[in-house]
Amino acid sequence: MSKEDFKKRVSDFVDQDDYENALKTTQEAQEIFPNDIDILELYGVMLVENNEHEKALNVFTQNMNRSDASSTTFLFLGQLVEGMDSLNCYQKAYELLNPQDLNVKEKKVSILCAMAELYLSDLCEEENAEAACESYVNEAESIDPNNVEILVTKCSLRICQLRNDEAKEAIQKAYSKVDANKPETWPTYEIRTNMAKRLMETEFFTESLTILAMNQLENDEDVEVWFLFGWVYYLKKDYIESYDCLEQTLVLIEKLQIEDPAMLSQINEMKSEIETMGVLEENDNEEVEEMDIAE
């Protein structure tokens, strides 16, 4: 098989959401073309998609020292490292973007958003954090003011600045661009997850649940999605639904052997509060009464 044949085969597997066979195919290609940067970058990407982050980090770290490494190497390195190292990788990825790429505008916005988000998380203690974040947001917005990802990032920044009305305006605009009945309007899974969080934080609970339902259609064993379902229902004061979702989150945490002490603590805290409210017993009594009537 030629290099292009391998790439086409990988693309076909990705279109079918079969990332396991996509990875196997890139491994086969790498054995035949061990020094080809396109194949090595594709191999690294498929490792990331299969959650083999340590192996992916090794691949991209080796790639970065090559003169022919593309924006892809530094973009994914930025996702795999932290803090200033991540920022430096994103900056390099931005510099190496191919202006002839049909999706270059979208890629620019995505990288700028990633750098802005760093100043809201890893680099939030930097002296220039707010100004740097604002600068990246403004630059991204100048490229595409209607891009959903930048609107979600802008909402995050405005929440941190306690500019709540502007945060709500940004996230409402982002939500308006997504039609639950038209998957072609859906942004990526990760962007949808972030959108659901920002909708929750700005108290658009019903809208947040709608976005989470989209993700559930794609992956019904995502612990974070079930946790967010439980949290949103809790804030919405729909405690029975919240409790059920939190229980499902615990089932998946055990099944998938996920270690997240902070999430586990919050789940147990919400469950405990719901249990002390007495709403679970009331619900059980109502169900018994309904069964008696039915009989």
Image (cartoon, grey):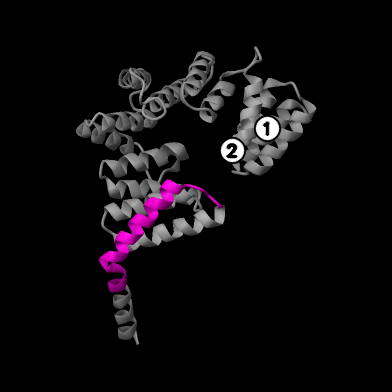
Residue at coordinates 50% horizontally, 49% vertically from top-left?
Answer: 219
Is residue 149 one of those drawn in magenta?
A: no
Q: Look at the numbered disc 1 and give the secondary structure of its residue.
A: helix
Residue bearing the label numbered 2: 49
Q: Is residue 163 above or below residue 251?
A: above
Residue 28 makes an appearance in the image:
yes
Q: Which residues are magenta?
A: 257-283
Q: Quadrant of residue 173?
A: top left
Residue at coordinates 61% horizontally, 29% vertically from top-left?
Answer: 57
Residue bearing the label numbered 1: 8
Q: Residues within 10 Å of mark 1 (few under 14, many from 20)?
A: few
Q: Is residue 183 above or below residue 135?
A: below
Give how far across and how far down residue 246 sits, in percent.
Answer: 40, 57
Mark sitting on residue 241: none
Which callout, 2 or 1, points to the residue nearer the camera?
2
Horizontal side of 260 relative to 286 (left or right) equals right
Give how far across and how far down residue 156 sits, in percent.
Answer: 32, 32
**Mark 2 vs mark 1: which is more N-terminal?**
1
Q: Amino acid at mark 1?
A: Lys
Residue 46 makes an appearance in the image:
no
Residue at coordinates 49% horizontally, 53% vertically from top-left?
Answer: 220
Q: Look at the numbered disc 2 and give the secondary structure of its residue.
A: helix
- The residue sitting at the left extreme is 165
How many badges with numbers are in the image? 2
Q: Amino acid at mark 2?
A: Glu
